[in-house]
């Protein structure tokens, strides 16, 4: 039987909205489950976490995060497995990464008991919200923000950590057309590119919108100095299959260390692929795309897992088509990763945390 942790207050909803949800017509991130977790930090300490019905929270307009952007988030998923279990994918990695973001933004680290134990309790309560249809999952959004109510440009004294959850459909975005970005940058050396700071996304919307107006789907970010080296693809890490080698930009303080990226590198090794984490120049990729040694390119991230790239725009008038093989490396890896998540393949790496 479930035993509530004494140090966590749990209030169940009296009217679940689950039966009103049309699971066949979900818009990403617009439907929320019955419960949420919220935990505040004040007087130098985390307070008792609380799980309660999903609801609006009253906030002052002097809310610190709105003015100074001390805010960071995580994105992760819970999956329904073939034996009926619900399991989380590598949640400790998200907990550690949220705390790396928190440290860089001078926010307090979230204790494991609050993040992991709280998350498990929350998902237990909302487990009927985890869709069982193929490729559907429950998207989980843990986040932390500064919640003092003053507008002086100094660090906040109070912080709020919360988790909300949203059932999501399969992410059939199709292959994407990416633009090599040579004007704007998403991050700089010494900056906050390696964190999931809210402001990184706010700063990316404008260049992404410009790329869309030019007919692209996403941006292929390059280094901020000379725009010579490839860094990421939109909000995903990027992988190139050159001949038989998996080539991905090496991590740095400008690149977000994706959990999907790390998992795909492990799977690639298991599949016997050669793997290179190194600098990847735009000119190398352009040459490989033109001489045919670039066999595939794809983005890697929680939302789409693998998002195939069908075109790379080196310039607006220099767009090169990239093969999207139906049974290529990207497709195989996506299948393998999904099979581990649903429990169809054995979880040899111990990635899944079963919640029931
Ligand atoms: C979240 C994110 C990723 C992917 O990380 P995952 O842990 O695989 O979801 C990659 N790049 C950026 C910029 C991101 O925000």
Image (cartoon, helix red, strand yellow):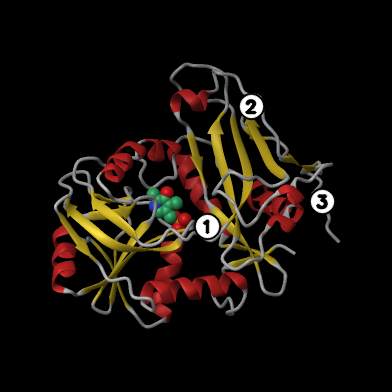
Label 2 element class: loop
Q: Quadrant of residue 144?
A: top right
Disc 3 designates what residue? 4
Mark 3 secondary-structure assignment: loop
Report helix, strand or loop for mark 1.
Answer: helix
- Which dot marks residue 43? 2
* Ligand 1 lies under 8 Å from the Cβ of mark 1: yes
Q: CA distance from mark 1 to mark 2?
A: 28 Å
Q: Residue furthest right?
A: 1
Residue 158 in the image, given as x and y percentages of width and height: 59, 27
Q: Is residue 216 above or below residue 146?
A: below
- CA separation, marks 1 and 3? 24 Å
10 Å crowding of disc 3: few (<14), some (14-19), many (20+): few
Residue wearing tag 1: 93
**Which one is closest to the eye, mark 3 or mark 2?**
3
How far from the left and from the top, in percent, is residue 112?
63, 50
Q: Position of residue 62 (x, y in %)?
A: 54, 18
Residue in the picture at 31% in, 48% down: 254
CA distance for labels 3 and 2: 26 Å
> What residue sits 47% from the left and 32% below the top?
70
Point out the tag, 1 or 3, that comes first from the N-terminus.
3
Contact, mark 1 vs mark 3 (Cβ under 8 Å): no
Estimate how packed mark 2 is, as few (under 14), some (14 to 19) or many (20 or more) residues with alpha carbons within 10 Å: few
44 versus 262 height, above or below? above
- How would you rate the neighbour count of disc 1 (Cα within 10 Å): few for under 14, some for 14-19, many for 20 or more? some
The residue at the point 73 percent across, 57 percent down is 127
């Amino acid at each position: 039987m479930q035993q509530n942790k004494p140090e966590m207050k749990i209030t169940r909803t009296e009217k679940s909205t689950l039966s009103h949800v049309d699971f066949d017509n979900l818009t990403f991130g617009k439907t929320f489950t019955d419960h949420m977790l919220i935990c505040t930090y004040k007087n130098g300490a985390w307070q008792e976490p609380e799980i309660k019905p999903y609801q609006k929270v009253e906030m002052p307009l002097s809310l610190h995060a709105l003015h100074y952007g001390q805010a960071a988030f995580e994105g992760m998923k819970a999956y329904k497995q073939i034996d009926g279990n619900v399991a989380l994918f590598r949640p400790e990695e998200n907990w550690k990464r949220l705390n790396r973001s928190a440290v860089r933004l001078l926010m307090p680290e979230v204790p494991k008991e609050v993040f992991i134990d709280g998350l498990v309790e929350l998902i237990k309560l909302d487990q009927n919200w985890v869709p069982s249809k193929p490729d559907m999952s429950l998207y989980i959004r843990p986040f932390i923000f500064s919640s003092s109510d003053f507008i002086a440009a100094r660090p906040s004294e109070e912080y709020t950590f919360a988790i909300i959850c949203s059932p999501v459909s399969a992410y059939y975005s199709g292959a994407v057309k990416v633009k090599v970005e040579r004007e704007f940058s998403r991050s700089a050396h010494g900056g906050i590119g390696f964190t999931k700071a809210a402001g990184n996304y706010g700063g990316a919307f404008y260049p992404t919108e410009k790329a869309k107006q030019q007919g692209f789907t996403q941006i292929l970010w390059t280094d901020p100095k000379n725009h010579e080296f490839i860094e990421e693809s939109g909000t995903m890490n990027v992988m190139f299959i050159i001949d038989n080698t998996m080539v991905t930009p090496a991590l740095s303080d400008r690149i977000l260390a994706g959990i999907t990226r790390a998992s795909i590198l492990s799977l690639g090794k298991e599949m016997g692929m050669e793997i290179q984490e190194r600098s990847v120049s735009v000119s190398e990729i352009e040459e490989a795309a033109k001489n045919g040694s670039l066999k595939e390119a794809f983005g890697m991230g929680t939302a789409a897992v693998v998002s195939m790239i069908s075109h790379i725009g080196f310039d607006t008038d220099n767009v090169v088509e990239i093969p999207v093989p139906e049974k290529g490396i990207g497709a195989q890896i996506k299948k393998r990763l999904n099979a581990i998540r649903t429990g169809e393949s054995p979880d040899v790496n111990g990635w899944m945390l079963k919640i029931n």
